[in-house]
Image: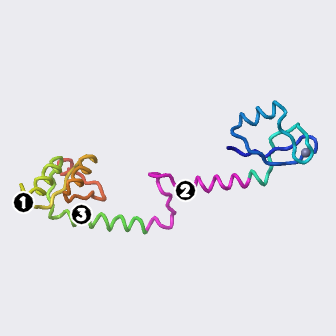
Amino acid sequence: MIVFDLKCEGQGHVFEAWFGSSADFEDQKARGLLSCPMCGDVRVVKALMAPAVAAKGNRRSVAAAAPAEGAPVPMGNADEGRMRALMQAMANAQAKALEGSTWVGRTFAEQARAMHYGEKDRASIHGEVAPDEARALISEGVEVAPLPFPIIPPEAQN
Ligand SMILES: [Zn+2]
């Protein structure tokens, strides 16, 4: 259903009417089924009523301001310094956590699984894993967690 602001051409009365679609409006108008509720004039046109248009515009902009799922969240400049400090603190924490950890690269899933099932001594490891493989590990109960920051593999460093 859509609502149109309509206006009679004779005296300029403005009124609202609901239609199933824009085509419905055209169809009813063409068949002379539309008339002004105040004076009965059948010469009815779509009105551009300034206050109503503004109200609808406001509603639309409120909806557009709500971020869609997965969309980037707008961040104010005032938060930038604090955000950067937080990111740095998190990066430092990650670096510290990885100090005693061994980079195992693409064999991560295999090794994490071996440790989980007791085929290998437990140790702190980090490496690369495809998202679906990470989900599989988690569903098996293997204790894995994504790192908040990307790691430069040792073989790529230099
Ligand atoms: Zn009228």
Q: Does residue 149 lie above or below 39 as drawn?
A: below
Counting residues from the start of the chain, the first of labels 3 and 2 encountered is 2
Residue closest to the eye, 84 or 90: 90
Residue closest to the eye, 63 or 153: 63
What's the residue at 48%, 57% (across, down)? 73
Give the residue number, with chain letter if any, for mark 3: 95
Give the residue number, with chain letter if any, for mark 1: 121
Q: Quadrant of residue 17?
A: top right
Q: How many marks?
A: 3
Residue 38 in picture, x, y percent from top left = 90, 48
Tell me whether the residue at label 3 lies in contact with that at label 2, contact meaning CB atoms closer than 8 angstroms: no
Which residue type does callout 3 highlight? Ala
Q: Dot 2 lies on which element?
A: loop
Residue 153 in picture, x, y percent from top left = 21, 50
What's drawn in magenta, residue-wise?
54-81
What's the residue at 24%, 55% (across, down)? 138
Counting residues from the start of the chain, the first of labels 1 and 2 encountered is 2
Q: How is the image coloured?
A: rainbow
User: In the image, which disc is placed on residue 66?
Assistant: 2
